[in-house]
Image (tube, helix red, strand yellow):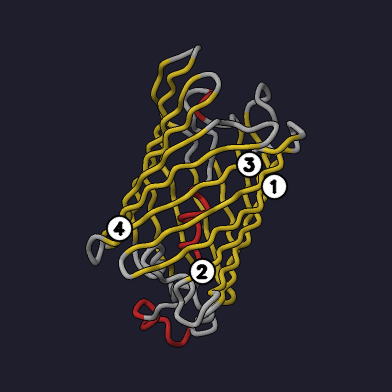
């Protein structure tokens, strides 16, 4: 489903326009420094995603590390997924496709921002069902904008392209375009979000869309939790419904 790459891909924004003030930017609420994102801090994200499919269920536990680089206009991210399958054909647990990305933020003001990201997925899954069987290159452009002066309503839009460049010849090539939009409402320590992602899989010549709701809360200064249920739609949808929960730890 990969939808969490939007929810936590938002970490990848920074105010290059205010680079001279980068040392103080972690204390300022700009478009991507709300309780949900905290781009300016070293972060660990742990989350679990359950997906129901026509052939059974998949459960992915993911550990994610995010590190600002240099003057914090760059960001590094790495993901380590552990996948469990309970389907008609197998009941197995193993490593999924490891990924790493680097992002750069050319524009970020107090009410808007733009970021670009390049991500590589390695063909590390121990089972074909746990990954794509391919090496992927995934460029993404993000845009964020506050709708209000109080900075309580935030839009995040992203355009992403996934393409395979190496891997098993027995697996289908990956050629997918994703346009995703999320709106977040922030109220004190809490947030609420709605999201819709439109995915066109050129290999399958069909759509694999999904939508979700998200509820989150900042429980301490360094820790946040969230949950979000999701539903898939489209002629080539990859699952029926899902549920995800996670925790963000700043350090």
Count of numbered circles on the image:
4
Q: Nearer the viewer, mark 2 or mark 4?
A: 2
Of label 4 and label 3, which has the lower sequence position?
3
Do labels 2 and 4 touch, CB within 8 Å? no
| Mark 4 neighbour class, 10 Å CA radius: few under 14, some 14 to 19, many 20 or more | many
Judging by the rendered image, the residue that carries numbered circle 1 is 177
| Up-down relation of residue 24 to residue 237 (above or below) | below
Q: Secondary structure at mark 4?
A: strand
Of label 3 and label 2, which has the lower sequence position?
2
The span from disc 2 to disc 1 (Cα, nearest Å) is 23 Å
Q: Which mark is residue 224?
A: 4
Q: In the shown orientation, is residue 251 left or right of residue 77?
A: left
Q: Nearer the viewer, mark 1 or mark 4?
A: 4
Q: Which mark is residue 129?
A: none
Residue at 44 percent of width and 50 percent of height: 78
Q: Residue 192 versus residue 201: which sits nearer the camera? A: 192
| Mark 3 neighbour class, 10 Å CA radius: few under 14, some 14 to 19, many 20 or more | many
Judging by the rendered image, the residue that carries numbered circle 3 is 209
- Residue 69 is situated, as x and y percent measured from the top left of the image, at 43, 68
Do labels 1 and 4 touch, CB within 8 Å? no
Q: Secondary structure at mark 1?
A: strand
Of label 1 and label 3, which has the lower sequence position?
1
The span from disc 1 to disc 3 (Cα, nearest Å) is 11 Å
Q: Secondary structure at mark 3?
A: strand
Judging by the rendered image, the residue that carries numbered circle 2 is 154
Q: In the shown orientation, is residue 185 left or right of residue 134?
A: left
Q: In the shown orientation, is residue 139 left or right of residue 11?
A: right
- Quadrant (top left/top right/bottom left/bottom right) for the C terminus: bottom left
| Residue 204 location, quadrant | top right
């Amino acid at each position: 489903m990969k939808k969490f790459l939007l929810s936590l891909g938002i970490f990848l924004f920074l105010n290059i326009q205010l680079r001279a003030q980068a040392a103080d930017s972690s204390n300022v609420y700009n478009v991507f420094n709300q309780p949900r994102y905290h781009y300016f801090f070293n972060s660990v994200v742990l989350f679990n995603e359950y997906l129901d499919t026509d052939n059974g269920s998949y459960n992915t536990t993911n550990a994610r590390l995010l590190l600002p680089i240099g003057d914090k206009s760059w960001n590094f991210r790495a993901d380590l997924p552990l996948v469990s399958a309970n389907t008609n054909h197998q009941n197995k647990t193993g490593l999924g496709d490891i990924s790493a990305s680097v992002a750069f933020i050319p524009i970020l003001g107090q009410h808007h921002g733009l970021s670009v990201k390049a991500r590589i997925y390695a063909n590390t899954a121990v089972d074909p069902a746990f990954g794509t069987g391919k090496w992927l290159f995934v460029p993404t452009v993000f845009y964020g904008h506050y709708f209000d002066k109080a900075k309580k309503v935030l839009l995040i839009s992203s355009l992403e392209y996934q393409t395979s460049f190496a891997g098993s010849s027995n697996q289908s090539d990956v050629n997918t375009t994703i346009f995703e939009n999320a709106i977040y409402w922030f109220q004190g320590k809490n947030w609420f979000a709605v999201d819709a992602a439109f995915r066109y899989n050129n290999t399958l010549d069909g759509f694999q869309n999904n939508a979700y709701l998200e509820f989150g809360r900042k429980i301490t200064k360094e820790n946040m939790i969230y949950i979000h249920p999701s539903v898939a739609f489209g002629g080539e949808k990859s699952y029926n419904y899902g549920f995800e929960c996670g925790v963000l730890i700043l350090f």
